[in-house]
Amino acid sequence: MPQSDASEQFPLTLGEEPAFCPACGKPVSPQVLEAEHRPRLVCPEGHVTWRNPRLVVGTLPVRDGRVFLARREIEPGAGLWSYPGGFLELGEATQEGARRETEEETQLLIEVGHLIGVYSRPHAGVVTIIYEAQVVGGEELPGAESLEVHGFGPDEIPWDELAFTTTESALRDWIRTLPGRGPRFEPELYVEGDPSG
Ligand SMILES: [Zn+2]
């Protein structure tokens, strides 16, 4: 089950179900199509209005071992910290969108690096893709939707003030990639002859 977080304030980023067909303007109604198992919104002309999750793209921009987060000015999660990110635009590759959103929200210039993770938020209708990024220029300054931009070391992350569970997951996944921070051998799990095992 997805954990609850500030995105609950935004029950569905797709918005309300449309009442009219975007193709012809006639009213749509839920119908189960042949060879399908769930109702789709269909108009009398047979146009199907597809509703699928939206993609959010963002980065964890890193310079000198510090990861830059933005404190959000807007809901959901106003006043809390998250990675710079936003909705992918049509015609944009995920890395391009992640870089655009990062540069808009932090004024940092970045090179997008490896994938940190892909995070599903079914209740919000969102899939979030987060990349690590190297800061190559610029100066951290809040963009239009941020109050503040700050670089945190891995031991300085404000875990209690993160906007989304996705923010926490991405930061934990980033920290796991750092030298000496990866998953460790846990000998208590491998005791031979453990009577309880
Ligand atoms: Zn139609």
Image: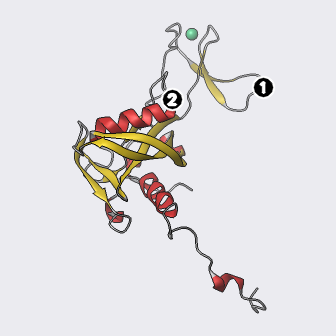
90 above or below 165?
Answer: above
Locate residue 34 relative to residue 41 in the image: left or right.
right
Say what secondary structure mark 1 lies in.
loop
Residue 3: percent from the left, percent from the top? 49, 57
On residue 93, the disc is 2
Residue 11: percent from the left, percent from the top? 43, 42
73 above or below 31?
Answer: below
What residue appears at the point 48 percent right and 26 percent down from the top-left corner?
Answer: 92
Q: Amino acid at mark 1?
A: Ala
Look at mark 1 in the image and give the residue it sits on.
35
On residue 151, the disc is none
In the picture, the quarter occupied by the C terminus is: bottom right
Locate residue 33 relative to residue 157 in the image: left or right.
right
Q: Nearer the viewer, residue 60 or 1?
A: 60
Say what secondary structure mark 2 lies in.
loop
Q: Quadrant of ligand 1?
A: top right
Q: Residues within 10 Å of mark 1 (few under 14, many from 20)?
A: few
- 1 or 2: tag closer to the N-terminus: 1
In the picture, the quarter occupied by the N terminus is: bottom right
Q: Which quarter of the figure has residue 16?
A: top left
Q: Amino acid at mark 2?
A: Ala
